[in-house]
Every structure is written in structure tokens, then in C-alpha cells.
Image (cartoon, rainbow, N blue to C red):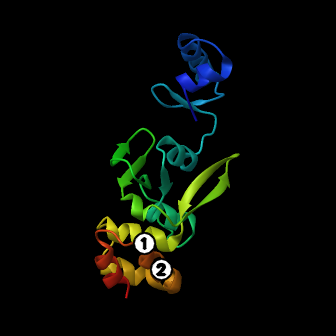
Amino acid sequence: MYSVQQLSNLIGKSKAVSTVYSSRLVKKGLAIRVMKGTISFVDDLFVIATQLVEPSYISLNSALLFHEVLQQIPKAIECATTKNSLKYNNVKAIYHKIPKSLFYGYKRYGKANSYIFVAEPEKAIIDGIYLNLYGKKDLDELAPKVSNTRLLELADRFDGRGSKKIRSMIK
């Protein structure tokens, strides 16, 4: 994914020339317009979502779908970030703000000749509990499908506000 400024730096031309160049790439079907001033050469929403806001990783139901823990396809790709919560309707991506002390438990995967960052299934559950998106009923449904040992390890690693709530729900 490239902004007009990044494209300008890559090709060594002015921003105005890069703007025209990016429009032509989109018109010829060689790139897709992610949003104004940003294009991508990869037409994969997981790749776009994980690279649109940095730092971020795919989490919650989207990560559980990726790891085949859930079968339901969410309406939007859900991500965790340390930046303020955001929603991009044109990309169908939602970013939930979590503290830096909870920003762990994800891995890099190759996808569509690029990369994505995805939370481990157990970390996606912890993120959902922290964000008040998963309750006890959800945890009871998901717990048999993931590693309880790994769930406890990841929960014990977090020592910030809300950590007691997470541990009490898991144990």
C-alpha cells in the first residue's frame, strides 16, 4: 500500500505527477484505490486492513475466522491498535484501541504476495474480553476450541487496567 507521497519518493517525481500516475494505475486496473491519496497493488482486505493503520493486527472475530475457530464471516475486519479507535467503511475495517501493554500475542503471515499480522486465537479472545465485546457466554463457547494453557499464559502477561477482569473470566 502506498500513499501519493510514498509513490512520489519511489519514482522520484513530484507529488502532482504521482497523483496523476496513481489515478492511471487505478483506471488501468493495476492498483485499487483504498482511500483518497492511498493505493494498493494487492486486492486483499486482510492485507489492506493490517497495513492501513500501523501498528495494528487483525483480532477478535476476524482472527478467529482466520484460524478457523469460527465459521461466521464478520461484516468488517476487526483490528487492534494502540492508536485511537477508527472505522473505515470503504475498506470495511474497524480498529479498536488497546493499551500498549496489551499489544502482543500476534504473528506475521504471508498472504497475497504481502503480509498480515494476526492475533493468536487465544489473544483474540483476550482482546474481546478487554474491549467488552465477549462475555462469559462467548468464552464458554470458544474455550473448548483453543488452548486453555496458552489463554492463561497470555492473560498473565497483561498487568494493566482490566487484567483482573480478564483473569477472573478465564479461570
Q: Quadrant of the C terminus?
A: bottom left
Gap between marks 1 and 2 measured at Cα: 8 Å
Q: Quadrant of the N terminus?
A: top right
Vertical order, 71 against 143 (above or below) = above
Query: Residue 48 location, x and y as percent?
Result: 54, 43
Looking at the rendered structure, the secondary structure element under dot 2 is helix
Query: Residue 166 location, x and y as percent?
Result: 34, 77
- Say which residue appears at 35% left-offset and 45% top-offset: 86
Query: Residue 107 location, x and y as percent?
Result: 59, 62
Which of pointers 1 and 2 indicates the residue nearer the eye? 2
Residue position marked by numbered label 2 in the rendering: 151
Looking at the rendered structure, the secondary structure element under dot 1 is helix
Residue position marked by numbered label 1 in the rendering: 125
Vertical order, 48 against 21 (above or below) = below
Q: Nearer the viewer, residue 72 or 63?
A: 63
Apparent side of residue 6 relative to residue 157 in the rendered image (left or right): right
Work out whether residue 15 can be spotted.
yes
Work out whether residue 27 can be spotted.
no
Give the image quarter of residue 39.
Answer: top right
Q: Nearer the viewer, residue 71 or 38?
A: 38
Cβ atoms under marks 1 and 2 closer than 8 Å: yes
Q: Residue furthest bottom?
A: 171
Apparent side of residue 133 relative to residue 93 in the rendered image (left or right): left
Q: Nearer the viewer, residue 64 or 170?
A: 170
Query: Residue 144 location, x and y as percent?
Result: 48, 86
Amino acid carrying mark 1 in the image: Ile
Amino acid carrying mark 2 in the image: Leu
- Say which residue appears at 43% left-offset and 58% top-offset: 74
- Name which of mark 1 and mark 2 comes first in the sequence: 1
- Say which residue appears at 39% left-offset and 66% top-offset: 127
